Amino acid sequence: MNLRICIGILSVLCGTLAGDARAVSLCLDRPISFAHYEFGLLYSEGYGGIDDDVQKELAKRSGCQFETSLRPRARIWVELERGTLDMAGSGIQTPARDKFAWFAHYVVEDNHVHIGPHVSPAIKSMEDFIADPKLTVGGVRSYSYSPNYDRQMQTLIDAKRFYSVNDPIMLYRMFDSGRYDIFIASQFLSLNNFRILQLRPPKRIEDWDPDPPTPSGLVVSKRSFTPAQAEGWQRLIAQMLADGTIRKILTKHMGPEAGPRAMFGRP
């Protein structure tokens, strides 16, 4: 065999072996602590949910052992910063949180308008809705949706077209009974509440907020993992997005229409 060819083959083999040697284990020397918080279809105790399925798929692909728990959302952020918690699902990235965590987005969080049967198909925005004085909206007292929705809701409150409820569950029952025409909520919550209450979701659930949805996903503590390990977890999430696994999980819990819309990086 030609000496140059032999040297080339050896170079490739050595490069492969060197790459294997550089491969970083994503695991810790103990089970990875992973926290869920209650948020409808993302995670509910006794049901599981999107984050639960994502965590199980990460365990399968990485070969790492996990120890899961249910904790208040505010406590999760404190413990990720302290390093007493290694990982969490569906966290929203901010500059303050970038100081103590890495992120790998797999869903987008947005508030959608749930539209009753008496709203004309010609109404396709909050501006259209506000222009029809016969239409009303329901909402939980003092709840904030987004800067745009909050401003428009105040217009409806001032016009006495807002039905206020104290109990989020009552919001769904009153909508189902036709008390008002629309309400605004995250589909992660609303589809789960319709499921629990055994109510049929409306045929029209639309995004009338011009602002883009908020990405959310895996949160990895910088106190627990190295940058190389964090890149490995981000690659796993990217693979799950690319190979359709995340889409399949979202469709399983949210249905074939809402599921794909909730996926990060959707077309």
Image (tube, rainbow, N blue to C red):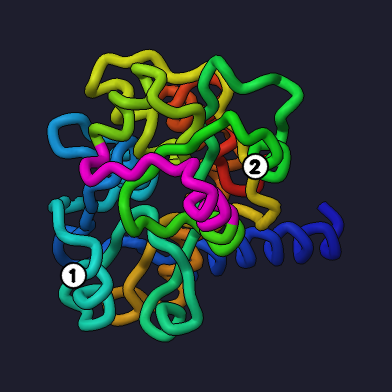
- For badge 2, the amino acid type reads Ile
For disc 1, the neighbor class at 10 Å (few under 14, some 14 to 19, many from 20) is few
Image-quadrant location for residue 77: bottom left
Depth order, front residue of 228/111: 111
Residues marked 2 and 1 touching at CB (< 8 Å): no
Residue range in magenta is: 152-168
Image-quadrant location for residue 266: top right
- At horizontal 36% and vertical 67% (from top left) the residue drawn is 220
Residue 153 is one of the magenta-drawn residues: yes
SS category of the residue bearing label 1: helix
N-term mark: 2 or 1:
1
Residue 175 appears anywhere in the view: yes
- At horizontal 70% and vertical 40% (from top left) the residue drawn is 131
Mark 2 — residue? 130
Q: Position of residue 21 (x, y in %)?
A: 46, 67
In the image, residue 128 sits, relative to residue 154, either above or below, namely above
Depth order, front residue of 190/237: 190
Q: Nearer the viewer, mark 2 or mark 1?
A: 2
Q: Position of residue 155 (x, y in %)?
A: 57, 54
Mark 1 — residue? 75
- At horizontal 35% and vertical 62% (from top left) the residue drawn is 26
Q: Position of residue 165 (x, y in %)?
A: 28, 42
- For badge 1, the amino acid type reads Arg
For disc 2, the neighbor class at 10 Å (few under 14, some 14 to 19, many from 20) is some
In the image, residue 230 sits, relative to residue 134, either above or below, namely below
Residue 54 appears anywhere in the view: no
Q: Which mark is residue 28?
A: none
Depth order, front residue of 125/61: 125
- At horizontal 61% and vertical 59% (from top left) the residue drawn is 148
Residue 26 is one of the magenta-drawn residues: no
